[in-house]
């Protein structure tokens, strides 16, 4: 009788749960934490390091993320490459930047869900590793990004930039000396309005392989400023940006 009584009690509990409409697999609390940021990358830019990533839009279970508060970026400095260090050891990392999404970014730039920032506190010959962790408004840390490592090498010399203004477009041309090490891949072009600072994100999505760029669809009676960086692939396979070029300014000319 005791056995049958327990079976009946268990059946009643099952019916009660079903009646309450509770269905589906359980979701563990850690799966509600933010997923890792996407497209996390770091590359040498001039004599600094440019860090870029895409904010997570879902939690670790794949549900839409509604309580993302910011990102914590940590940094490790080493005299040897990441292949010679413990990639999973976090005790050597130190907090580099804590970004809050509802506050003006501290040295960072946001475009939609993409963020970019520059680390200027680096030295030639050292290795710098970075990881990024999202956190919620409740202070819960999410999944960490993969580790990315940059070795700082001698900065690539800047290209030279020229500008020509025409009635419907602004033509830019650039030239650079062959790099000391590696091969030239192309150029990254940066544009801003007269009173604004330059973006960390170039106009082009992939390095420009030619030596000219025609900028069209521009507003009339508006001054545009430009600068360019050469992109070089090192023997290690890493891409680096050169020191920034000279700055030029252009404006659409009146019809002749």
Image (cartoon, rainbow, N blue to C red):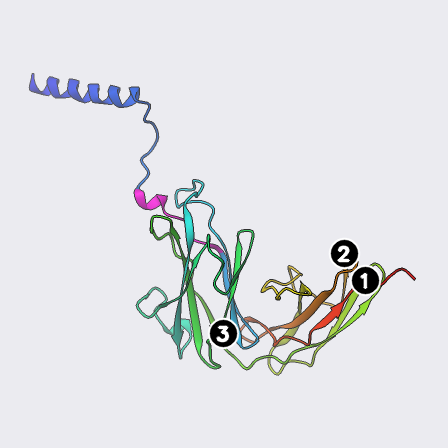
The quadrant of the image that shows the C terminus is bottom right
Can residue 35 be seen here? The reply is: no
Q: Is residue 98 above or below residue 246?
A: above
As helix, strand or loop, the secondary structure at mark 1 comes to loop
Q: Are marks 1 and 2 in contact (CB under 8 Å)?
A: yes
Q: Where residue 54 sits: x, y (%)?
A: 51, 54
In the displayed image of the protein, which residue is found farthest to the left? 1
Q: Where residue 41 sits: x, y (%)?
A: 50, 63
| 235 and 32: which is toward the camera | 32
As helix, strand or loop, the secondary structure at mark 3 comes to loop
Q: Which residue is mark 2?
A: 219
Q: Nearer the viewer, mark 3 or mark 1?
A: 1
Can residue 183 be seen here? The reply is: yes
The quadrant of the image that shows the N terminus is top left
Q: Which residue is mark 3?
A: 120
Q: Where residue 103 sits: x, y (%)?
A: 46, 55
Measure how far apart labels 2 and 3 are at the Cα level. Answer: 34 Å
Left or right of 208 on screen, residue 124: left
As helix, strand or loop, the secondary structure at mark 2 comes to loop
Q: Which residue is mark 1?
A: 252
Which stretch is magenta? Answer: 29-38
Query: Residue at coordinates 20% horizontally, 18% vertically from top-left?
Result: 12
The earlier-in-sequence mark between 2 and 3 is 3
Query: Residue at coordinates 42% horizontally, 48% vertically from top-left?
Result: 68
Q: Are marks 3 and 1 in contact (CB under 8 Å)?
A: no
* Residue neighbourhood size for the residue with mark 2, other residues' Cα within 10 Å, grouped as few (<14), some (14–19), many (≥20): few
């Amino acid at each position: 009788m005791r056995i049958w009584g327990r079976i009946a009690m268990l059946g009643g509990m099952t019916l009660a749960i079903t009646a309450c409409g509770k269905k589906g697999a359980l979701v563990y609390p850690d799966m509600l934490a933010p997923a890792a940021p996407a497209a996390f990358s770091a590359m040498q830019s001039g004599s600094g390091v440019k860090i870029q990533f895409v904010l997570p839009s879902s939690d670790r279970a794949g549900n839409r993320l509604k309580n993302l508060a910011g990102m914590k970026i940590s940094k490790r400095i080493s005299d040897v490459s990441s292949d010679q260090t413990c990639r999973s050891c976090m005790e050597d990392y130190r907090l580099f930047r804590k970004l809050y999404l509802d506050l003006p970014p501290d040295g960072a730039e946001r475009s939609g869900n993409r963020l970019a920032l520059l680390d200027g506190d680096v030295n030639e010959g050292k290795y710098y590793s970075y990881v990024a962790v999202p956190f919620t408004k409740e202070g819960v840390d999410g999944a960490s990004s993969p580790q990315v490592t940059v070795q700082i090498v001698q900065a690539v010399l800047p290209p030279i930039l020229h500008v020509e203004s025409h009635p419907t477009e602004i033509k830019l041309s650039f030239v650079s000396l062959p790099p000391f090490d590696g091969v030239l891949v192309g150029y990254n072009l940066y544009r801003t309005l007269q009173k604004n600072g330059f973006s960390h994100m170039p106009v082009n999505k992939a390095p420009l392989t030619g030596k000219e760029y025609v900028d069209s669809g521009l507003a009339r009676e508006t001054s545009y400023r430009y600068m360019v960086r050469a992109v070089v692939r090192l023997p290690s396979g890493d891409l680096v940006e050169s020191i920034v070029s000279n700055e030029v300014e252009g404006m659409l000319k009146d019809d002749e």
